[in-house]
Each structure stands twice: as structure tokens, then as C-alpha cells.
Amino acid sequence: MFIREKYRYISRYQFELPYNPKDIKMNNKPTVQIKKILLLNPFMFNAKNKNVGIDPVVSRHAGQEIKTGVTFPIGLAYLAAVLLKAGYEARILDPLAEDISVDKIYSFSEWAGAIVMPYSPFHKEDTGKYLHDFRGKLRILCGSIAGHVYDFLFKNDFCDVILKGEPEETIVDLVKQYPNLNSVKGIIVRSDSGKAIINESRDPVQDLDGLPFPARDFSSPANYWDISFFGKPTAWILPTRGCPFDCIFCAQHDLNKKKVRRRSPKNIVDEIEQVTKEQKVTNFVFFDETFNLDPEYAISVCDEILKRGLDIKWWCAGRPDRVREDVVRKMKASGCIEMRFGLESANDEILEYLGKGTTVEKIRRGIEITDKSGMNFSLQCIIGSPMESKKTLRNTLKFIREVRPLFVSFNVLTPLPGSRLFDEIKDKIAVEEGLGNFDILHTDFPLGKFTSKELAAIIKKVYIGYYFSFGFMTKIGRECIKNPEMFSWIIKTLFVQAGYIFKSILARK
């Protein structure tokens, strides 16, 4: 059970404070209503961030350079959209993707009354240095990790407010109510004495159709791309939020609580159509957890795309044990080129430990249906469970060679904040230090027989073993034959991704 000295535990999501705060006061902050908000991705002062897999939660919602490309900061884009709709001025800066100078970042920071940043442990020194320079602004941190390390963040004067939970409704309420934040749900506030005041939680957004489409005009669409489209401009969209499964490693667990919320097919395709017309982008990532969870819903989205005659390509994440042949055919007809499956491991005992709720045989059947339908598929694997051994690793690699995916992502089991795994071992984690190495490739928290150093060596070995294999070369050759007009894009992307993997995995000591 999680116990802290300052708080008495009540339930999993609520704490009782040992004092009754009245007005929340913050010295040296603007006392007038804030009109201008800067939404800023983490950055480094003295180097380009070429590391991959820094923080999968930040990657998903804030945009990041990862193994498969440069992701669009969809979380910040939603925040900008709701603020703009509410009548505020909002600007997104994505320093890595846009190659923005520090001078420009500081210039926009002077313009803003409030600064919003996702918290990434990898960037904590640079983020702390930057935010210390703007103590006169309202400093807000977001992302799933920040709400778990508020003592560290407040003690070291990183920020004044932390957004905890889904942020779209919270950010508008916060700005409207500022500087009187007592009634704002879904925030943690640093009081004048430095203590954390945890306000009442806010429920996740229920009417997803009621949210404005993410703001996308702050940056060129060419800055964001995915390996499955071989470097061509790509747009990210979120058709659904949440997942009913109970995977032990999922960092979205405490946010969604196993509940799924869906946008209507019309609303999803309205956004797709807007992007194709305004940004001239025709490649899409459906960035929800499990698009094929409900077969009828998946078919209805595909039918809406087909009804409008949209000539697009897209990929989605899915569960192989939920694959149906008729659904795959419909997805393919509407432009889906690939499904990405969480294999995690080809060992039933590890799948059971991870909470996957499936078996290797069910995964194999779903992959076979997908493959026979002529659709590409990729796999994601997790190495380092407590029962992991050389034998279980061999089983997983043998399975991968047999099914021959297009791409494979190998990661280390990491107790990400927000996951059940984090809840189980958080007393052993350096939360008071703002967290250590949580990049899913180089964890400081090995959970099984292998040390961190051994896991890093295994990751290097499996990447070399797969991407320099005859099977992978054959797959890429077939892609070139199927799409000769894409040959130069394919070769360019492979070289870029090889550079990412070399710098972040192979050359890292």
C-alpha cells in the first residue's frame, strides 16, 4: 500500500491533506487573467535530442523522436485547440521537430502569461533550468509522469501547477479561474509554503465529439513522419481513448480505468477529410490503443472513409486475438496498410504475468489471418519479465522468424508511472529524484534475472539479429517491388532509422 508521511491514504486516487487550505497563493505570479499560453515540448539547450523511446507517454501525447519516426504532439495540439476555442491565444513550439533555437523559445516565453510543458525525466535538468528562468510566469507541467513526482517538482521549483488526468477541460478551467484555483478539478498546486495541494480529480472527457480537432497549423506537416509511410508526411489522430484490458505495463491504466470512449465514425472522418484538404496529408496513424477492439465499430469507420471516397493510407494498433477476416478486408479496402500487434512474448506464462489475457496460439491465428489477407503487420515485444530466461527469449525470437513481420520493436519491461506495475513496486523507485531512466530501452529497474547492463546487451543483439536478417531484407525488397515509386523514400528512411538505432541503442554504453 502506498503511504506518504504528509498524506493519509484514503483510496487509490484520493488523499486527505493534513490541513485545510483556503486561498491558494503564489508569489511573483501574474495576478490578472492570463490570455496568452505557450505550449512547449521538452528540449535540450546544448544538443539535439536524438535518443529514442525516452518516455512512451510523452511520445504518444507530446510528440517525440522515436524508433519509428517523429510523432505529432497530439496532446499539446488538443490543448491548443480547446484554448483557442475558448478565446485565448495559444502557440505550440516543438523545438526538436521544428529545429527551433533557444533564443526563439525564450522570445515566445516572454510573450506568454502561462507556459505548459510535458514532464520527461530524460529532460529534467534542461526543463528545470528553463522554467527557473520564468518564475514570473504561471508554469504548468502535464503528462502522466508529472502527477507522480509532484514532491520533487515542487521542491525544486519546476512549476506552480500540475495537470493530473485528461487535460483538455482542466486547462480551460484553470486559465479561466486563475488566480483562484481552489475549485479547479484535476490539478495539483504548489502553495506559497511549497506544499502540494491536491484538488478533486476530474473525470475523463466523455463527449469526445465535442472536442475541437487538434490544432495543426503551427508547424509544417513534413516535420512529422512514420516509418510505415517511409518518411512521407504523416498525421496522427485519436479515434478512441482507453482500453478494457489489464496489461500490467500500460501507462494509461490509472487514467482510463479499463473504460473505452469512442468518437463517432463521422467525427473521425471529418477530421481526416479536413487534414487531407488543408494540409494535403494522406498518411494517417490511428493512435488509439486497440482499433479492432469492436469489429462493428471498426467496420463503421472504414465504411465512412469509403463512402466519402477518400484516397488515404493508414495504420493502427490492434490485438491479434481480435482479428476477423471480414474486418481486415474492410480495413484494407479503406486504406489500412498495416496493423501493429503487441506480441510482447511468445511464452504463455509471460503473457499471463503481463496481464495480456491471451495466448501465443491465439496471437498466431490472428497474425495468420492478417497475413493471408495481404496486409502488413508489425510486432512489439517486451523483454525482461521476472520469468524471462534465455529459453523464453529463444522462443520469442523463433516465433518472430516464423511469422515474418515487417518491423519489430524490442523494449524492456519498465514500471511506467500510471501502470499497475508501477503501483506494485513504486516504493523501490526513486520518485523523490524525479524518476530515473524510464525510456523503455535502458531501464534502471530490472525486474527479473537479467541486470540493466545485460538487458541493454540483449536489446542490441536482437535489433542486430532482426534488422540484418535475410528475412527482413526480403520483406523490404518486396515492399520496393510493390511500390517502385517509393524506392528512394524507403532507402532514405531505412538509413535514417538505422542512425537512430545506432545512436540510441547500439552505440550507447
Image (cartoon, rainbow, N blue to C red):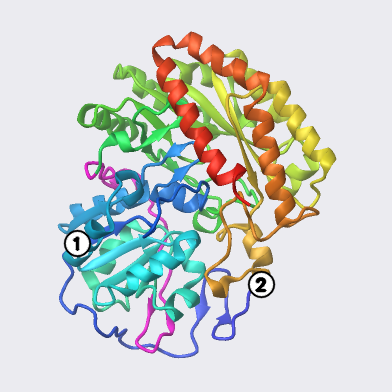
Of callouts 1 and 2, which one flags the residue occurring earlier in the amino acid sequence? 1
Q: Quadrant of the N terminus?
A: bottom right
> Does the stretch in magenta take in 209?
yes
The count of marks equals 2
Q: Residue at x 57, y 77 (%)?
A: 10
Question: Can residue 163 be spotted in the picture?
Answer: no
Q: Amino acid at mark 2?
A: Asp
Question: Can residue 338 be spotted in the picture?
Answer: yes
**To which residue does mark 1 refer?**
107
- Callout 2: 10 Å neighbours few (<14), some, many (20+)? few
Residue nearer the viewer, 259 or 249: 249
Q: Is residue 243 above or below residue 130?
A: above
Q: Is residue 255 left or right of residue 388?
A: left
- Callout 1: 10 Å neighbours few (<14), some, many (20+)? few
Q: In which quarter of the view is residue 233 placed?
A: top left
Q: Is residue 505 above or below residue 273?
A: below
Where residue 317 appears, x then y in whole percent? 52, 34
Query: What's the mark number on residue 51?
Result: none
Q: Amino acid at mark 1?
A: Ser
Q: Nearer the viewer, mark 1 or mark 2?
A: 1
Q: Is residue 470 left or right of residue 439?
A: right
Where residue 309 appears, x then y in whole percent? 30, 16
Range of residues picked out in magenta: 189-218
Query: What's the mark number on residue 427?
Result: 2
> Does the stretch in magenta take in 391?
no
